[in-house]
Each structure stands twice: as structure tokens, then as C-alpha cells.
């Protein structure tokens, strides 16, 4: 059931020591449950309280129907989840539109405010702020739940939009963009935690597929709509319009945010019932235990749903008190990562990572020279050293389980977006396409991404997340390889279209399952930390590859060879992702049905 269930897998120390690096047997604290008929107040459709009961003797992990108990939702549009799904999708849509629209109107903004010198800073400030916000919001969500962090993040995002939308000077607009970065980075992480705590685990692939779809429409019409708004009214309304729409989007989520504790208690009791006498055993390997800065790996545990994700067919374990587990889920545990010294250190490291990424990115604007390469290498070294404590242990070494999952997010994003940056430029320079026609290739990729996301959502638990991740990485590898062939063998526009159709399908298959796996490896104590690590990996991967491919592109020279060289670097990362993805999860692991 839900990854937030407080039915914890107690890892026996002697078993952990006996079989390091393998799925070890574990003793589950769990119990069956029945309903007492009382409906909790708060969330849409209400929630209910589990008080004890039995499980079915048939298929593992399924409970026997009991009088008065409503079955867990099986659709995102179930009345109990409808407003949560709509509100979450609305926030993703608006954040995606803002990201796409700003790229379109920023040249007009810089000219209007006489701020060409701060043009790149308007983008880098957002990136730097988002990395910092990811760290803070993850720890805050683990400490107090996602409700207050999400409301605060949305408020900061709105303030940033208003500041940017009313700016009369470029420095003020940069300040607004910085606030937008703080808000958007925190919204991303807190939405992940909300998914973990409000949606049953079998629905996680569908939720993240919906989020992926939420980026498709803005990528298709966002730039055009932003241009129309700037021409008909003013670029100011590109920011202010989003600010007006964010408030009702958040309002859709207020019912679920108010009733999260009751929902978590219900999920915990359902998970206890589902994993009772026929519950799953097993934990991730030692490498996959969710430990980041301030959270020691020893004694870490995974939720019952994670055990079901990783070892669904394990033998039975003794039952315990479901009520105690449900009550534990309703009260956030003290989070070891949330203390003054470790939090301050994490924020300082995030600042270093952000500044190093901005500095490394600026080297791509320099003429290719030994100095530029040295600066880029130094910046990447600083990023690697500073980001390491913000990620699960052994992430940079692709440790099996959670570390490999987090690393795969960064390398996959780098391979795909590193190629996408230069694809329209190649079509314009080498094949004479207009910017609008060249952008159609990206639209094809976005539609393919959507189709891949919907495919993995429909597959649900029938195919293991680890296997879909490997398949998606293979598709991205093939897509990038086709772009290299397009550049060297003069395949033209058809080659670029086919390549990005294949690559987009791969991203749609893989990205939602990366998020699903991270939540499966997490407990309520570290969902925020692990979600922030996933987002940081994404941001670092995309930013670092942009800087390095920029230097490679400029160093090789002009012509199609320079594009092929940049794509070749992305291909190496895509191949590495295939290898890393094989360590992200056991191939036989399926989501609980």
C-alpha cells in the first residue's frame, strides 16, 4: 500500500551482517484490520479508521473484504483523490508554463528593462535558488509533513511572480526570479512527499505519469501563448497571469492538506492489513538504505509498501498491532536530519553547489581555451564534492538500490536535455529550418514523452519499475545515437524526428518509475530527503552537461561534426544510465497490486 505507511520493516542486525549487499530477510511489524465504521473529517470523500481484523488467505498482500470498509482507491479520479489529483496537476502545469514562457519573453524583458548584462543571471538565479530550496523543503517535509512547506513554497513562488511581473528594473526582476526558484524547487519536492502520503502505492506510477503529461501541454503551446500575451498585452502579464492562477490551484489541495494525518493513518492500517500474515519480507540492500546528510544509515527501515515493491513474494511474518502503526503514521517522527547543525551545513553545501553550477555554466560562454577547460573541471569537482553529502551514500558510485536510482535520474536528464539543447540549433544551421519549424522536433519529443508516461501508467504493477527504467534508458540511448547518425550521415529532418520520437518515449517510460522507486525506498522519515536528492540530481545533471557540451561544441569547430561531438558526450551518459539503471531495483520487483 502507501509508501508512507508506518508499518516498518525491522532489519535484524545479524541478518544484515550475514548477507550484506543482498536482500535480507526481515521481521515485519504488521497486522490485519477491519473498519470501525467511523468516517474521519477533512479530506474529500472522507477517510476511515482501522481497528484490527484479518487478511484473505489467497493472494499475498490482499485483504479479505470486511463490512463497512471502503476499498482503497484504484483511480486518480476516485472521489477521495479527485481534487488532490487536479490540484497537483494544476501546480505542475503552471510551473511548467512559467518555465517555458520565461524563455520566450526574456529577450523582450531584457530590452525593455535595459538589462542585457543580467540576461543569463535571470536564469542562473532561479537554478541556484531551486537547489537551495530542494534541500530545505525536503528536510522540512520530513519533520512536519508536506502541508506547511507546500503552502509556504507556493506563497514564495507567487511573491516571486508578482515581483518579476511588476519590475521596472532588471535587478528587481532577477530578485523575482530568485524567489521563483525558491518556490518552484520546494514545490517539486513537497509534491513528491504529498504523493507518497496521499496516494496508495499502486497509483504512484499513474500520478507521476500525470505529472509528466503536465509538462507536455506547456511545452507545446507555452512559448506561443507567452509570445501572444507579450504582444497583445505586456510581458508583465506572463508573470502576473500565472500568479493569479496559482492561488486557486493551491485551494484545490487544501482539503487533503488538512486531512493528511487521517489519510496517513488509513494508509498505515490498510498496509498493515495487506501485509499481515501474508506480508512481504525483505529490505533494500545496505547501499539502498535512505541515508543522507544528518540521517545515519544504521537502523534505517523501509515501509511495508517498499518491501512489497522490492520483494512481493516473500514468506509470512508475525503480526503486530495495526492501531499502533496507524497512530504512528499520523504523528510525524522526529527526523534525525532536522537539527540545526546538519540543516545549516546542508544549506551551505547547497549554496556551494548552486554557485559552482552557475560558475561552471558561465564557462561555456568563454572562448574554448585551456583556462576555460580548467575552470569547468574545477567547477565540476566542487559540485561533486559539495553535492555528495546531500545525496544518499554511494550515489556517485552507483550503489545498488536508492543510490543508483538517484544517480540514474541525473545521468538520464543530462543525456536527454544535453541533446535537446543542440537539436534545434543543428536543424536551423545545417538544414535551414526556421526556429518555429525546428521547434516542432521538440514538440514531437514532448508528445512521445507523454505517450511513454501513459504506457508505463497503464502497465502499473504488471512490469517491474526496474525493468521499465532499463527499457526507458535504452530508448533514450537509441534516440541520442540516431541524432549522432543524423549529424554525420545527413539524415536530415526525418532522422531528427525519428530520433526524438524514440528518445521521448524512453523518458516517458523511465522518469515516472524513477520517482516511484525513490518513494518505494523511502519511509515517512526520509521521503522529503530522498525526494530532494532526486531533484538535486536532476538539476545538477542538466546544468553540468550544458556547460561541458558547450565547451565541446565550441572546441571542435563548426559544422555537423561539432554537433556530433556534443551528442557523443550525451550518448556516453545514456549508456552509463543503462548500466546504472540495472542496479536501481531488483528486476523481479513489482508494485503491489
Image: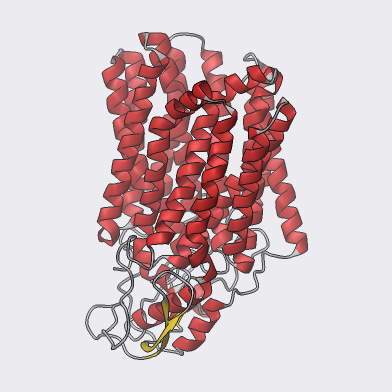
Work out whether residue 237 or residue 220 is closer to the camera in this orientation and state it.
237
Q: Height in image: 450 above or below 445?
A: below
Residue 44 locus on image (x, y percent): 42, 69
Q: Height in image: 585 above or below 382?
A: below
Name the quadrant containing residue 465.
Answer: bottom left
Circle count: 0
User: Image point 67% across, 28% down: which residue?
Assistant: 121
User: Image point 49% across, 43% down: which residue?
Assistant: 94
Quarter containing the N terminus: bottom left
Tell which residue pokes out farthest to the left in this image. 58
Residue 97 locus on image (x, y percent): 48, 37
Q: Height in image: 37 above or below 490?
A: below
Q: Height in image: 365 above or below 143?
A: above
Residue 262 locus on image (x, y percent): 49, 77
Q: Report if residue 414 is visible in the image.
A: yes
Name the quadrant containing residue 318.
Answer: bottom left
Left or right side of 31 for 463: left
Left or right side of 519 for 71: left
Q: Report if residue 18 is visible in the image.
A: no
Amino acid at each position: 500500500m502507501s509508501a508512507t505507511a508506518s508499518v516498518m520493516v525491522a532489519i535484524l542486525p545479524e541478518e544484515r551482517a550475514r548477507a550484506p549487499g543482498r536482500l535480507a530477510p526481515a521481521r515485519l511489524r504488521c497486522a490485519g484490520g477491519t473498519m470501525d465504521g467511523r468516517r474521519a473529517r477533512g479530506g474529500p470523500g472522507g477517510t476511515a479508521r482501522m481497528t484490527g481484523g484479518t487478511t484473505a488467505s489467497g493472494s499475498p498482500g490482499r485483504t479479505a473484504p470486511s463490512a463497512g470498509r471502503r476499498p482503497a482507491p484504484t483511480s486518480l479520479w476516485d472521489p477521495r483523490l479527485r481534487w488532490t489529483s487536479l490540484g497537483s496537476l494544476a501546480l505542475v502545469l503552471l510551473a511548467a508554463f512559467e518555465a517555458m514562457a520565461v524563455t520566450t519573453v526574456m529577450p523582450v524583458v531584457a530590452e525593455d528593462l535595459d538589462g542585457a548584462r543580467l540576461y543569463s543571471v535571470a536564469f542562473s538565479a532561479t537554478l541556484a535558488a531551486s537547489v537551495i530550496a530542494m534541500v530545505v523543503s525536503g528536510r522540512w517535509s520530513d519533520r512536519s509533513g508536506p502541508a506547511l512547506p507546500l503552502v509556504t513554497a507556493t506563497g514564495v513562488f507567487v511573491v516571486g511572480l508578482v515581483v518579476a511581473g511588476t519590475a521596472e528594473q532588471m535587478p528587481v526582476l532577477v530578485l523575482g526570479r530568485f524567489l521563483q526558484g525558491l518556490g518552484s524547487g520546494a514545490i517539486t519536492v513537497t509534491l513528491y512527499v504529498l504523493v507518497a502520503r496521499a496516494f496508495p502505492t499502486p497509483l504512484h506510477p499513474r500520478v507521476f505519469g500525470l505529472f509528466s503529461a503536465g509538462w507536455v501541454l506547456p511545452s507545446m503551446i507555452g512559448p506561443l501563448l507567452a509570445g501572444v500575451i507579450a504582444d497583445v498585452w505586456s510581458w508583465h502579464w506572463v508573470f502576473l497571469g500565472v500568479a493569479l492562477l496559482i492561488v486557486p490551484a493551491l485551494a484545490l489541495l487544501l482539503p487533503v492538506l488538512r486531512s493528511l494525518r487521517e489519510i496517513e493513518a488509513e494508509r498505515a492500517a490498510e498496509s498493515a492489513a495487506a501485509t499481515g500474515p501474508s506480508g512481504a519480507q525483505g529490505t533494500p540492500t545496505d547501499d539502498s538504505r535512505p541515508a543522507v546528510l544528518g540521517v545515519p544509515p544504521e537502523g534505517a527501515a523501509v515501509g511495508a509498501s517498499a518491501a512489497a515493491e522490492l520483494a512481493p513474494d516473500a514468506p509470512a511474518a508475525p503480526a503486530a498491532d495495526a492501531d499502533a502503526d496507524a497512530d504512528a503514521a499520523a504523528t510525524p517522527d522526529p527526523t534525525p536530519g532536522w537539527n540545526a547543525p546538519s540543516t545549516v551545513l546542508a544549506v551551505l553545501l547547497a549554496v556551494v553547489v548552486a554557485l559552482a553550477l552557475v560558475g561552471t555554466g558561465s564557462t561555456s560562454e568563454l572562448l574554448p581555451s585551456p583556462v576555460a577547460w580548467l575552470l569547468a573541471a574545477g567547477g565540476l569537482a566542487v559540485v561533486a564534492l559539495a553535492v555528495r553529502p546531500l545525496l544518499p551514500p554511494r550515489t556517485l558510485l552507483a550503489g545498488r538500490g536508492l543510490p543508483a536510482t538517484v544517480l540514474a535520474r541525473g545521468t538520464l536528464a543530462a543525456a536527454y536535455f544535453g541533446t535537446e539543447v543542440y537539436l534545434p540549433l543543428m536543424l536551423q544551421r545545417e538544414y535551414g529550418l526556421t526556429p518555429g519549424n525546428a521547434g516542432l522536433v521538440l514538440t514531437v519529443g514532448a508528445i512521445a514523452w507523454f505517450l511513454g508516461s501513459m504506457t508505463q501508467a497503464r502497465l502499473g504493477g504488471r512490469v517491474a519499475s526496474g525493468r521499465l527504467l532499463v527499457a526507458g534508458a535504452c530508448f533514450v540511448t537509441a534516440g541520442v545515437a540516431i541524432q549522432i547518425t543524423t549529424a554525420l550521415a545527413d539524415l536530415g529532418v526525418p532522422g531528427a524526428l525519428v530520433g526524438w520520437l524514440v528518445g521521448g518515449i524512453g523518458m516517458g517510460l523511465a522518469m515516472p518509475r524513477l520517482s516511484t522507486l525513490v518513494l518505494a525506498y523511502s519511509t515517512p522519515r526520509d521521503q522529503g530527503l530522498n525526494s530532494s536528492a532526486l531533484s538535486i540530481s536532476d538539476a545538477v545533471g542538466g546544468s553540468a552537461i550544458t556547460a561541458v557540451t558547450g565547451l565541446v561544441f565550441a572546441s571542435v569547430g563548426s559544422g555537423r561534426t561539432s554537433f556530433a561531438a556534443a551528442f557523443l558526450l550525451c550518448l556516453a551518459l545514456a549508456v552509463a544510465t543503462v548500466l546504472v539503471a540495472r542496479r536501481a531495483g531488483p528486476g523481479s520487483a513489482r508494485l503491489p497490486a
